[in-house]
Amino acid sequence: MDRTQGLGLPSVTEILGIYFDWDKIPKDRLLAAQDRGISAHDAIYAFLTDTFYPVKTIQPEAKGYYLSFLSWFEETVDKVIYAEKELICNCFGFQGHVDFVGILEYDNLLTVLDWKTPITEQRHTWRAQVCTYWHLVQVHGCLPKELPQVGRCGSIMLRPDGKPARMKEYTKYSARYFNYFVMALGAWKGLKGV
C-alpha cells in the first residue's frame, strides 16, 4: 500500500475524527473493529492489485466483509484505476488515503469509494471524508488525461454475512461536504496554531 508518512500534514480522518465520540465504544470493541477493518482492507487491496494474499490470513471476523466486497465487485466494477493511494493536497495542506478509484459497470465517470465495515453509517463524517477524497483525486490524483472526470463518490458498506455490499452514494453532497471539511480543517489549523 502507498502510505505517505512524516509529512507533518493532517489527514482527512484526523481532522474529522474529532467529530466522532469514540468514548461511546468500549475500547476492546473498538480495537477489534480496527483489526477487522485493516484485515478486510488488506485483502481487498491485494485483490484489486493482483498481489498474492493468502485468503487464510484474513481474520475470521473479516472474511464475511471480504466476501461481501467480492460479490459487489463482480457485479459492479468495470475498471480499477488505483487502490489504497495516499494523496496530498498542497492547496489546503492535508493528506488522505483513498481506498478506490475506478469506473463502474453502469457508468463512464470515475467513482471514488471508501470501504466501510461498521453496520451503522456515520453519515456526516463519512460524507465529508469521501467528498474530500473526490477533491484529492480530481485535483491531485495525477490522472491520465484520457480518463473521465470524477463524477461519483460514496461509501461501500461491506456486510459481515458475506452478502453483496451496498453503496451509499454521496455525489449530490460533494461540494457542500467538501466545504464542511475545509471549514473543519481551518478550525483545526487555527486552534492548533499551524
Image (cartoon, rainbow, N blue to C red):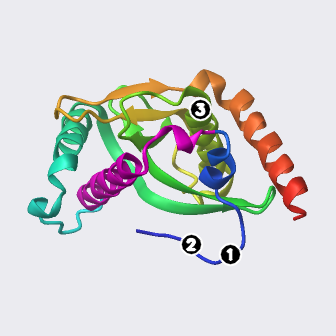
Task: Specify the amino acid type for callout 2.
Answer: Thr
Q: Are marks 3 and 1 in contact (CB under 8 Å)?
A: no
Query: Which residue in the structure is indicated by mark 1?
Result: 7
Tell me which residue sits at (55%, 27%) in the image: 123
Query: Percent from the top left, x then y, of residue 7?
Result: 68, 75
Dot 3 falls on a residue whose secondary structure is helix
Magenta stretch: helix, strand or loop mostly: helix
Check residue 4 in the rendering and tell me which mark sits there, or answer none. Answer: 2
Dot 1 falls on a residue whose secondary structure is loop
15 to the left or right of 5: right
Alpha-carbon span between mark 3 and mark 2 = 23 Å
Q: Which residues are magenta?
A: 20-48
Which circle's residue, 3 or 1, is located before the other in the chain? 1
Query: Which residue in the structure is indicated by mark 3?
Result: 127
Tell me which residue sits at (55%, 44%) in the image: 22
Task: Specify the amino acid type for callout 1.
Answer: Leu
Q: Is residue 144 above or below residue 66?
A: below
